[in-house]
Amino acid sequence: MAFVPTGSEASFFDALDRHQASLLAVVKQGAGEAPAGVTRVVSRFEDSVGLQMIPQCITRKIKSDSPKSVKKFALILKILSMIYKLVQSNTYATKRTWRSFTVSTLHFHRDIYYTDSQLFGNQAAVDNIIDDISCMLKVPRRSLHVLSTSKGLIAGNLRYMEEDGTRVQCTCSATATAVPSNIQGIRNLITDAKFLLIVEKDATFQRLLDDNFCSRMSPCIMVTGKGIPDLNTRLLVKKLWDTFHLPVFTLVDADPHGIEIMCIYKYGSMSMSFEAHSLTVPAIRWLGLLPSDIKRLNIPKDSLIPLTKHDQMKLDSILRRPYISCQPFWRKEMEMMANSKMKAEIQALTFLSSDYLSRVYLPNKLRFGGWI
């Protein structure tokens, strides 16, 4: 019978408290501090920061008199002029504040695209140019007053104030709170949470809310990026870590895609590596679903899924990454997956019982330190 904390059952959180103490010791030693500057081309990995850039980067020249680059030169100037107006007026390009557009769009990148779709060609061109400008100026996109609409959700023991003075009270109810669009602007964050749980998929996140996991495991915070996390969800996780230094855990499928998503939160992505110091949380631990859990819990083979050729290629790629050498337990789990040639979704735990994840698996993992 699994133990589930009720009231002030302090002993349940002993393993979490010890883990947090060790994290705070590392922070005090300065191991979690990021370098002052980053550049453009991925070349190295730093365990305390994530994927990093090298100063001796390869540069691309965009010329106004070159037939090959004249269009991109024009696009860069066009977007720079729009950013300049935003910075000068101290406004942010969001659905509410970008009033010069008639198209109701989800985020600023699309706002730009729709001002002259023939010029920009496609949405990806706008996204890439904004990344190039951010890297060229060595500032994060939010410093350019470019804000994206968030897709992530947050629930649990957290209160904060948004830049416009709106007070937000996240709860453990079945309705989660949308991750804010301006993470830099939120302030007065308050929590008593013992840990932060990042959930890979929205379906799993909603199931945990429906099972009242967040309330029964209170105080805690849960976040989901609904798959590959957007920039704001990553910024929020980073802000919560920087503010409270809570133990941060991930709950992902035992497959290469889930591991990839976990690595993005922990170590960053190559496309955003010039912002690694403001996006990554190397203190993140893998809570589940572990490939070893599948064997330990005797999950039947008909609840598993064979690895596809794409899965195998992705797994091989992750195993070759430099940060895996710093994670021998991760490597062991991934090699176990490679040898079995099988993967599993979190939903495979329903074979044991419909609420096994929320009532047994996660409480026992958290109580007895079952993370790597």
Image (cartoon, rainbow, N blue to C red):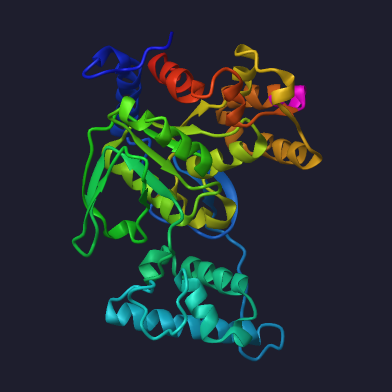
- Number of numbered discs overlaid on the protein picture: 0
Q: Is residue 248 visible?
A: yes
Farthest residue in the bottom direction?
Answer: 65
- The residue range painted magenta reads 337-341
Left/right of residue 352 with respect to residue 280 in the rendered view: right
Q: Is residue 361 above or below residue 263?
A: above
Q: Position of residue 332 (x, y in %)?
A: 64, 21
Q: Which quadrant would the N terminus be assigned to in this image? A: top left
The x and y percentages for residue 301 are: 73, 20
In the shown orientation, is residue 52 left or right of residue 305? left
The residue lying at 30 percent from left, 21 percent from top is 17
Tell me, yes or no, if residue 201 can be seen here: no
Q: What is the magenta segment's predominant secondary structure?
A: helix
196 left or right, relative to 355: left
**Along the line of sight, which residue is nearer the eye, 178 or 287?**
178
Whether the magenta-drawn stretch holds residue 367 is answered as: no
Q: Position of residue 318 (x, y in %)?
A: 66, 38
Decide which of 87, 295 is in the foreground and name it: 295
Residue 339 lies in the magenta-colored region: yes
Quadrant in which residue 319 is drawn: top right
The answer to which quarter of the image holds residue 296 is: top right
Q: Residue furthest right?
A: 309
Above or below for 197 versus 233 = above
Judged left or right of residue 288, residue 177 is: left
The image position of residue 5, as x and y in percent, is: 31, 17
